[in-house]
Image (cartoon, helix red, strand yellow):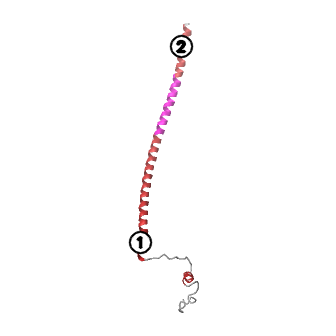
Amino acid sequence: MVESKVVAVWKLAEKGVELLRKVEEYKEAAEVEACRLAKEKKTMEASKRKAEEEAGQLKQELQELQVAFAVQKEELKAEYQKQVDNMFFYGYRYTLSFPSDDEDEALDGLAWGGGDASKAGLFSGHA
């Protein structure tokens, strides 16, 4: 009977040892996974910092461009107003310009009633 108890204790001890080995294997696997995840976390944090820096730079660049655009817009408005004021001051009037390959033809048609200057009587005193 003592022998059977000893055998039973040995079997229990072997099972305990086997369970300990499995636990150690799981522990090692968990540690390896933890190391991998820690490295991945560091990599992701570095990527996040880099992305945040780029976003900050882009925001700053956007703000600079918006300011430059606003300044340019105001300069153009001022220049346009100056041109309008000059046109009013000097009494310029807007005249239509008709695109034409032959300037004389366009001028003859408009200035002389659609014909030749001699037909309009410009030189004969009949206007």
The residue identified by callout 2 is 9
The residue located at (41%, 72%) in the rendering is 85
Q: Amino acid at mark 2?
A: Val
The residue located at (43%, 48%) in the rendering is 53
Looking at the image, which residue sits at the far front? 126
Looking at the image, which residue sits at the far top? 1
* Circles 2 and 1: CB atoms closer than 8 Å: no
| Location of residue 69 (image quadrant) | bottom left
- Image x and y of residue 29, in percent: 51, 30
- Other-residue count near label 2 (Cα within 10 Å), few / some / many at <14 / 14–19 / ≥20: few
- Image x and y of residue 118, in percent: 56, 90
Viewport quadrant of the C terminus: bottom right
Front in this rendered view, residue 16 or 47: 47
Front in this rendered view, residue 120 or 54: 120
SS class of the residue under badge 2?
A: helix
Badge 2 or badge 1: first in the primary sequence: 2
CA gap between label 2 and label 1 equals 110 Å
Q: Is residue 5 magenta?
A: no
Q: Amino acid at mark 1?
A: Asp
Front in this rendered view, residue 27 or 98: 98
SS class of the residue under badge 1?
A: helix
Instruction: Say which mark, if any, is on residue 85.
Output: 1
